[in-house]
Image (spheres, rainbow, N blue to C red):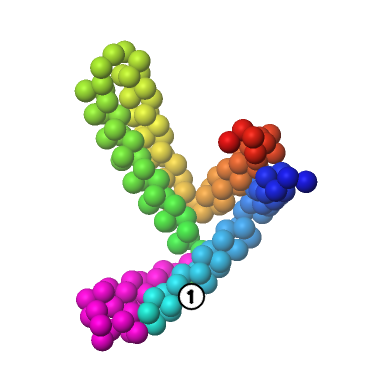
């Protein structure tokens, strides 16, 4: 069996797990992200101290980055809502970029088709603000969005062949 098909099936199974059991999935993702961030933080701090004699500025920056990673990792492990907050924050950033691009496009884009596309981008930016509010208010919303995305990506993997790329 093609590896793309195997990955597609795995994505669909994971997507269904996220939708069927969003809280458990969210806890698992938060734990994996937290453990990864803590490991990254520890390694960055160790690397920062090992470079201290040669490059004090860079090593100081690495130590601070490692401490921030440790704090974020602990936040992910002990506070599940951290993941929904970060996803919500990303949605807000994306929404402001989309709104800005939409407004600039409406003002400066030549032609009717470009203005319609800019208007659609502006509308998507406004919709993304609502997605951000939902994901911060309800962490389960993020898990369901991830599940739907995984299923769609899995179906995409199943329907395409390596020759399509």
Chief SS of the magenta region: helix
In the image, is residue 44 above or below residue 118?
Answer: below
- Callout 1 environment at 10 Å: few (<14), some (14 to 19), or many (20+)? some
Q: Is residue 26 magenta?
A: no
Does the magenta portion include 57? Answer: yes
Can residue 70 be seen in this snapshot? Answer: no
Is residue 100 toward the left or the right of residue 79 in the image? left
* Along the viewing direction, whichever of 93 and 58 lies nearer the viewer: 58
Residue at x-position 37% and y-position 79%: 47
Circle 1: element type: helix
In the picture, the quarter occupied by the C terminus is top right
Picture coordinates of residue 107, whole percent (x, y): 21, 23
Residue at far bottom of view? 53
Query: Based on the displayed image, in which of its 4 quarters is residue 25 positioned?
Result: bottom right
Q: Which residue is mark 1?
A: 39
Give the quadrant of residue 56: bottom left
Q: Is residue 21 visible?
A: yes
Question: Relative to 8, does residue 56 appear above or below in the rendering?
Answer: below
**Chain part drawn in magenta:** 48-76
Residue 73 percent across, percent down from the top left: 45, 71
């Amino acid at each position: 069996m093609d590896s793309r098909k195997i990955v597609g099936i795995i994505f669909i199974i994971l997507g269904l797990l996220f939708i069927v059991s969003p809280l458990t999935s969210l806890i698992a993702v938060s734990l994996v992200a937290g453990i990864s961030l803590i490991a990254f933080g520890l390694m960055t701090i160790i690397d920062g101290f090992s470079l201290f004699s040669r490059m004090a500025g860079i090593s100081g920056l690495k130590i601070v980055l490692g401490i921030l990673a440790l704090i974020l990792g602990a936040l992910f492990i002990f506070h599940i809502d951290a993941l929904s907050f970060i996803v919500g924050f990303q949605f807000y950033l994306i929404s402001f970029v989309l709104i800005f691009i939409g407004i600039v496009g409406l003002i400066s884009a030549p032609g009717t088709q470009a203005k319609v596309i800019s208007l659609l981008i502006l509308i998507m930016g406004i919709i993304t603000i609502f997605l951000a509010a939902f994901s911060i208010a309800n962490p389960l919303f993020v898990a369901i969005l991830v599940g739907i995305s995984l299923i769609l990506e899995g179906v995409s993997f199943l329907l395409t062949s390596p020759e399509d790329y």
